[in-house]
Image: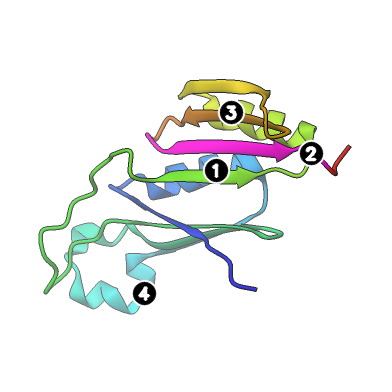
Amino acid sequence: MTKINAYLTFDGNCREAMTFYQECFGGELTIQTVAESPMAEQTPEAENDKVMHANLTKGDLVLMAADMIEHEGAGNERVVRGNAITLSLDCSSEDEINMFFSNLSAGGQVTMPLAEQFWGATFGMLTDKFGLNWMLNYDRTGNE
């Protein structure tokens, strides 16, 4: 089955963000820095501590990320925060959605509190402390 996984790009605080998400969701977090990769030879030494690739896995939940890295041949890319990405979590229980919503909203802003919706789900939206938008959904139909 084909799955879609979110890949997040940060501007130097990837390790902090992914550690926060691990605290929110649990799971196994692996982090590889630029210095630990073959790219170390092609990037300025100041970039060595940046995250080349991070992977958080808990069951079917996969969240990947990296810091924006400047290297030879790259353009002048910069991380730009905007509202073009929202991560949607389909939760497996009422307890889980409540826990994830509480954890993710710490230090952030709730834009729509968790509430029962007309489509038979508990649903809420928030922007976390790193500026990422989240939608959390727990479909109660068939799970009660």
Measure the alpha-carbon separation of dots 1 and 4. 23 Å
**Element at label 4:** loop
Which element carries disc 3, helix, strand or loop?
strand
Q: Earlier in the sequence, mark 3 or mark 4?
A: 4
Residue 14, position as x, y percentages in the image: 39, 49
Q: Is residue 135 a member of the stretch shown in magenta?
A: yes
Q: Amino acid at mark 3?
A: Gly
Which element type, helix, strand or loop, lies under badge 2?
Answer: loop
Residues shaded magenta: 131-141
Give the mark nearest the N terminus, 2 or 3.
2
Between discs 3 and 1, the one toward the N terminus: 1
On screen, residue 55 above or below 21: below
Residue 52: image location, x then y, percent: 36, 64
- Disc 1 or 4, which lies upstream in sequence? 1
Q: As shown in the figure, which amino acid type bears the numbered disc 4? A: Ser
Q: At label 1, which amino acid type do we have?
A: Tyr
Residue behind mark 1: 21
> In the image shown, does 47 or 139 lie closer to the viewer?
139
Distance of label 3 from label 4 (alpha carbons): 39 Å
* Quadrant assignment for the C terminus: top right
Residue that badge 4 annotates:
37
Q: Which residue is mark 3?
A: 124
Q: Residue at x 60, y 37 (%)?
A: 136
Residue 131 located left or right of residue 125: left
